[in-house]
């Protein structure tokens, strides 16, 4: 597999090193001379010095035959431009972009970027996993829709404990899909009675998360 990595910072360096160790053909595009020289010293002649936002540099890198282009510069706008050019001008099958601001994720996806990676989101997911009683755990954001699949436990303090689902006033556009209790999983119905400690999987809109959190955890 031929992978072009745009950005030779720490992320780009270690990604390139890992890909090479796994037997892939890799080329890094980096405009900073010191960084490019350092990568060449460490990994061999795998760097093209130049600006990956320029079509001529992508062409020189042979992006037209790349299987994947990964843009991991420190600038979200640059990463978007690089991936869009790779996709639309050079017909690269798959593009992956690093994003520094999680709010840009939806824009990247709407503009055709195949996948995004946000270190902020990854760290938040780890924090949420450690604090399951204080936050909703995001399982999946549904692409092209303002919907999220989330997980939360019913707190002993919650007003829904002891009630049937049909008696619970859920936020608008919210559904409880699954109830996990004592290791047993069941599909939620109107007759399902919620208990403290139940683990719920729900579908909700992003803007309704706060209401759902208050209902289940307060």
Image: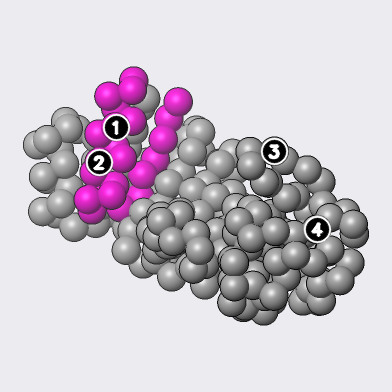
Secondary structure at badge 3 equals strand
Secondary structure at badge 4 equals loop
Which residue position is annotated with label 2?
Answer: 14
Quadrant (top left, top right, bottom left, bottom right) of the C terminus:
bottom right
Vertically, is 211 above or below 130? Answer: below
Position of residue 180 measured from the top left corner of the image (x, y, whole percent): 68, 46
Dot 1 alpha-carbon crowd within 10 angstroms: few under 14, some 14 to 19, many 20 or more:
few
Which residue position is annotated with label 4?
Answer: 193
Vertically, is 24 above or below 153? Answer: above
The answer to whether residue 53 is seen in the rendering is no
Q: Residue furthest top?
A: 23
Marks 4 and 1 in Cβ contact (< 8 Å): no
What's the residue at 43%, 46% (across, down)?
A: 70
What's the residue at 72%, 40% (across, down)?
A: 185
Which residue position is annotated with label 1?
Answer: 18
Closer to the chain start, of discs 2 and 4, is 2
Give the distance between the C-alpha atoms of the residues marked 4 and 3, in whole angstroms. 14 Å
Task: Please identify, in this view, whether the residue under mark 3 or under mark 1 is nearer the observer.
Answer: 3
Vertically, is 16 above or below 214? Answer: above
Marks 2 and 1 in Cβ contact (< 8 Å): yes
Relative side of 70 to 109, left or right: left
Secondary structure at badge 1 equals helix
What's the residue at 12%, 35% (across, down)?
A: 42
Give the distance between the C-alpha atoms of the residues marked 2 and 1, in whole angstroms. 6 Å
Residue 123 appears in which quarter of the rendering? bottom left
Closer to the chain start, of discs 3 and 1, is 1
Q: Which residues are magenta?
A: 1-23
């Amino acid at each position: 597999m031929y992978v072009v990595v745009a950005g030779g910072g720490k992320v780009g360096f270690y990604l390139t090193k890992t890909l090479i160790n796994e037997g892939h053909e890799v080329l890094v595009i980096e405009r900073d001379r010191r960084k490019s020289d350092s990568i060449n010293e460490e990994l061999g002649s795998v760097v093209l010095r130049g600006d990956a936002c320029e079509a001529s540099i992508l062409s020189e890198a042979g992006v037209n035959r790349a299987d994947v282009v990964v843009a991991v510069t420190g600038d979200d706008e640059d990463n978007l431009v690089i991936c869009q050019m790779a996709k639309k001008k050079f017909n690269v099958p798959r593009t992956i972009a690093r994003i520094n601001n999680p709010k840009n994720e939806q824009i990247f996806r709407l503009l055709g970027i195949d996948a995004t990676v946000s270190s902020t989101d990854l760290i938040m997911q780890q924090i949420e996993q450690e604090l399951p009683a204080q936050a909703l755990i995001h399982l999946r954001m549904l692409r092209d829709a303002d919907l999220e699949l989330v997980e939360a436990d019913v707190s002993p303090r919650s007003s829904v404990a002891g009630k049937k689902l049909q008696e619970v006033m859920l936020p608008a556009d919210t559904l409880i899909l699954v109830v996990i209790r004592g290791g047993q999983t069941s599909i939620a119905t109107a007759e399902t009675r919620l208990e403290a400690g139940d683990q719920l999987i729900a579908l909700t809109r992003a803007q309704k998360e706060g209401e759902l959190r208050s209902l289940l955890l307060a």
